[in-house]
Image (cartoon, grey):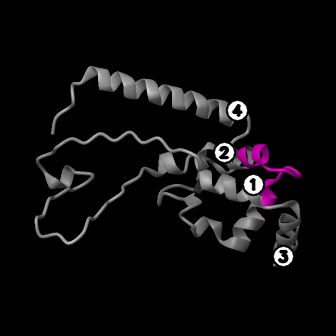
Amino acid sequence: MRVDSNATMVAEVQQFIDVLRGYMDEAESAGGDMGRVATVYDIHLQSVKKMKSADLVVAVSPTADGQVVLKKTDPNDTHPYSMTELIEKVNKHRKGRDLTSYDFQALCWKEDLRNNTRYAWKHDNAAAHVWSGDAVSYLASRDDAYYDQVRAEFNLS
């Protein structure tokens, strides 16, 4: 493995990324949900001698029938929000009344959101779940009538 030393190419790519990030910042400050538009990945590969030290093992096989892609992600990047941060972000993006932690608890109970890895993640040693950008979009998309219905069901349980 080697680093491509074409400085012109690196500068052009960096300029493109800077412009794109500027557009994304403008859209997000205007209330857009950028988690549904773009995701930035920084990938750094480094060869290691011991397989136990590797985060990702890659091999080339001339007899392989298809391609296998292994995607390893850091939940701290994909699920960055605490419950409080999640509710704040949802309230910025939704129409209708502001949601409360009780609304959130009721919806988690009704739809078992804590067990849906698309929305929630919890480390074995952590006390609380953390939430993804998809959770922001999903919770913001539900209307007041649905939250009222879920709260009523939750009160009866």
Q: Earlier in the sequence, mark 3 or mark 2?
A: 2
Q: Which mark is residue 4?
A: none
Picture coordinates of residue 53 (x, y %)? 20, 50
Which residue is denoted by mark 2 in the rendering? Answer: 33
Measure how far apart labels 1 and 4 are at the Cα level: 17 Å
> Please, what is the three-letter code of the amino acid marked with disc 1?
Ala
Q: Nearer the viewer, mark 1 or mark 2?
A: 2
Judging from the image, what secondary structure is the residue with disc 2 in? loop
Judging from the image, what secondary structure is the residue with disc 3 in? helix
The quadrant in which the N terminus is found is top left
- Which residues are the magenta region? 89-103
Report if residue 90 lies within the magenta region: yes
Q: Nearer the viewer, mark 3 or mark 2?
A: 2
> Please, what is the three-letter code of the amino acid marked with disc 4?
Ser
Q: Does the residue at mark 1 contact the one at mark 2 (Cβ under 8 Å)?
A: yes
Q: Nearer the viewer, mark 3 or mark 1?
A: 1
Horizontal side of 78 relative to 156 (left or right) equals: left
Which residue is denoted by mark 4 in the rendering? Answer: 29
Which residue is denoted by mark 3 in the rendering? Answer: 153
Measure how far apart labels 3 and 2 are at the Cα level: 30 Å
Measure how far apart labels 3 and 1 are at the Cα level: 20 Å
> Please, what is the three-letter code of the amino acid marked with disc 2?
Asp
The image quarter containing residue 6 is top left
Q: Earlier in the sequence, mark 1 or mark 4?
A: 4
Measure how far apart labels 4 and 2 are at the Cα level: 9 Å
